[in-house]
Image (cartoon, helix red, strand yellow):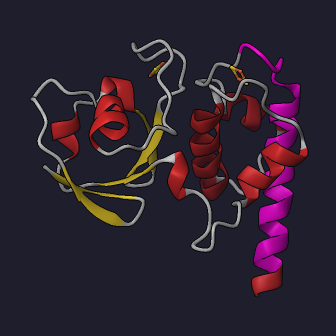
Amino acid sequence: MSLTVNGTVREATVPARRLLSDCLRHELGLTGTHVGCEHGVCGCCTVLLDGEPVRSCLTFAVTVDGREITTVEGLAGPGGELSPVQRAFTECHALQCGFCTPGFLCTVTALLRDNPAPTEDEVLEGISGNLCRCTGYQNIVKAVHRAAELTAEAEGGAA
Ligand code: FES
Ligand code: FES
């Protein structure tokens, strides 16, 4: 199979039952994507498939042949500068063990792309599919709002 991961075409030979999460981690060496529950509950394994968040632990790798994937490794800018979402999570101390963080970063990136200024309820709804057992969510919610501000500032500066 061949897929575009973080802007680069990658090829892999995988068994038909290989999960996308395992393919990313083991065949492609992208260990930023984490696996928690392995059955679609925790959201740790979330990556963007053609821009939309998906559970990579529920996705067979062969089904994304020819598609475009963004993993947490692909969120930073070309020079390695952190994305607004990554900066906000850092600023707001929105992570502890960091196991859930790659999934949150991908989910929130898509959330803010679709809704650049979410309300509190929209943030809670938007991250409701991602579980974190360390932070109590308060700083994660703060980080989503901060990321919205940083994105707006960046876009204002670019305009
Ligand atoms: S590891 Fe995929 S949802 Fe938990
Ligand atoms: S920071 Fe530990 S599970 Fe979220």
Q: Which quarter of the rendered picture does the C terminus lie within?
A: bottom right
Residue positioned 58% across, 57% down in the render: 75
Q: Quadrant of residue 15?
A: top left
Magenta stretch, residue numbers: 133-156
The answer to whether residue 57 is above or below residue 154 is above
Residue 124: horizontal and vertical position, in percent? 74, 29
Residue 52: horizontal and vertical position, in percent? 45, 47
Q: Is residue 62 magenta?
A: no
The answer to whether residue 48 is above or below residue 21 is below
The answer to whether residue 127 is above or below residue 12 is above
* Viewer-side residue, 126 vs 78: 78
Is there any visible trace of residue 145 in the rendered image?
no
> Is residue 138 left or right of 38 when viewed as pictured?
right
Residue 140: horizontal and vertical position, in percent? 80, 33
Residue positioned 58% across, 24% down in the render: 129
Residue positioned 36% across, 24% down in the render: 57
Looking at this rendering, what residue extends furthest in the bottom direction? 159
Residue 144: horizontal and vertical position, in percent? 79, 44
* Quadrant containing ligand 2: top right
- The dominant secondary structure in magenta is helix
Is there any visible trace of residue 44 in the rendered image?
yes
* Viewer-side residue, 59 vs 102: 102
The answer to whether residue 19 is above or below residue 116 is above
Residue positioned 61% across, 68% down in the render: 77
Q: How many marks?
A: 0
> Is residue 67 left or right of 98 when viewed as pictured?
left
Q: Is residue 145 magenta?
A: yes
